[in-house]
C-alpha cells in the first residue's frame, strides 16, 4: 500500500468518527447509535459514500437528523471524517465495512432514508449481483428501512439507471420521481449543490446525471 494511503488508513483506527470492527467503539455503537450521537434522531445512510460528500454536505441542513456514510475504503472515509471534524458536525458518523453486512450495525426498520450516490456501474452481466440496486441489495435495504421511507439513487451511468428503474419497479413497484437529466430538473433542489468526487469527474465530461427516488 502506498505510504500516504497507509498513513490515512492507520489514522482511521484512532478517528472517533469512523466505526469499524475491531475498534474500541464498535461493540457499543453498533445497533445503539444513540450512544454515538447522543440522541435518537432519524438516520440517513449514504452507501458507497467514498469521501462522504453527501453525509458531510447534508448534515448542516438537517441538524435534527443523523447521517452515516458507509464504504469499505478507509482512506476515502478519512476525508469525510476530517471534513466533519473541521465543520464541528455532531450529526455525522462513518462505518468502514461492506454494505452486504450493514445489518450488523442497525436494528431492522430503523433507517429513514438511504442515498446511493454514483455507485460502481458493474456493467458485466456476471457482475450483476454486485450492483447496489440488484434484488439482493434491495432486500437488505428493505430490511433496514422504516416502512414507507425512501431510497435515492444518483448515477451518471445510463445502463445502471435503466437496470435500477426496472429492478425497483419489479421488486418495490413505487418510483416516486425520476429524471435522466438532473441538472435540468426541478429535482435538483433535493441535492443542495452537493457534487461528489466522482460526479465532478463525470460533469467535466458533460455526462447527464440520472436520479430517482423510490419507496417500498
Ligand atoms: C464510484 S465510487 C463512488 C464514491 C462516491 N459515492 C462518489 O460519488 O464520489 C464507489 C464506492 O463504492 C464503494 N463500494 C463499492 N461496493 C461496496 C460494498 N459492497 N461495500 C462498501 N463499499 C462499496 C467503493 O469503495 C467506492 O468508494
Image (cartoon, grey):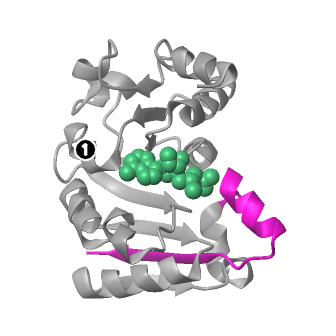
Mark 1: few, some, or many residues within 10 Å (few <14, many ≥20)? few
Residue 36, located in which quarter of the rendered image?
top left
- Residue at the (57%, 43%) spot, across then down: 52
Q: Position of residue 67 (x, y in %)?
A: 46, 42
Judge whether 164 appears above or below 127 on screen.
below
On the picture, is 18 further left or further right than 183? Answer: left
Residue 81 percent across, percent down from the top left: 57, 29
Residue 1 vertical position relative to residue 66 in the rendered view, above or below = above
At x 41% / y 79%, what residue is drawn? 164
Give the quarter of the image for residue 184. Answer: bottom right
Q: Is residue 46 visible?
A: no
* Quadrant the N terminus occupies: top right
User: Image check: 130 left or right of 46?
Assistant: left
Residue at horizontal 36 percent and vertical 37 percent from the top: 97
- Magenta stretch containing residue 181, yes or no? no
Rendered image quadrant of residue 179: bottom right
Q: Is residue 173 above or below residue 120?
A: below
Q: Position of residue 216 (x, y in %)?
A: 25, 75
From which residue to which does the magenta span run? 192-216
Q: Is residue 10 left or right of residue 174?
A: right
> Can residue 200 be found in the magenta stretch?
yes
User: Can residue 92 be seen in the rendering of this structure?
Assistant: yes
Which secondary structure lies at badge 1?
helix
Q: Is residue 130 left or right of residue 109?
A: right
- Point out residue 188 in the picture as x, y percentages from the top left corner: 66, 73
Q: Name the residue nearer the viewer: 90 or 163.
A: 163
Who's the residue at 67% across and 84% down the image?
A: 181
Q: Which residue is mark 1?
A: 101
Amino acid at each position: 500500500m502506498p505510504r500516504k494511503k497507509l498513513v490515512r488508513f492507520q489514522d482511521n483506527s484512532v478517528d472517533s468518527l469512523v466505526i469499524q470492527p475491531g475498534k474500541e467503539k464498535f461493540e457499543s455503537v453498533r445497533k445503539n447509535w444513540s450512544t454515538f450521537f447522543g440522541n435518537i434522531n432519524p438516520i440517513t445512510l449514504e452507501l458507497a459514500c467514498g469521501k462522504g460528500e453527501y453525509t458531510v454536505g447534508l448534515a448542516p441542513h438537517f441538524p435534527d437528523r443523523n447521517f452515516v456514510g458507509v464504504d469499505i475504503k478507509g482512506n476515502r472515509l478519512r476525508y469525510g471524517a476530517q471534513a466533519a471534524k473541521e465543520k464541528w458536525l455532531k450529526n455525522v458518523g462513518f462505518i468502514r465495512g461492506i454494505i452486504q453486512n450493514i445489518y450488523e450495525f442497525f436494528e431492522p426498520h430503523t433507517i429513514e432514508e438511504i442515498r446511493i450516490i454514483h455507485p460502481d456501474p458493474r456493467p458485466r452481466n456476471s457482475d450483476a449481483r454486485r450492483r447496489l440496486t440488484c434484488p439482493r441489495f434491495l432486500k437488505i435495504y428493505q430490511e433496514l428501512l422504516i416502512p414507507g421511507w425512501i431510497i435515492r439513487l444518483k448515477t451518471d451511468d445510463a445502463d445502471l439507471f435503466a437496470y435500477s428503474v426496472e429492478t425497483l419497479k419489479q421488486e418495490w413497484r413505487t418510483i416516486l420521481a425520476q429524471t435522466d437529466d438532473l441538472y435540468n430538473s426541478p429535482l435538483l433542489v433535493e441535492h443542495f449543490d452537493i457534487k461528489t468526487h466522482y460526479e465532478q469527474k463525470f460533469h467535466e465530461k458533460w455526462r447527464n446525471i440520472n436520479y430517482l427516488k423510490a419507496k417500498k
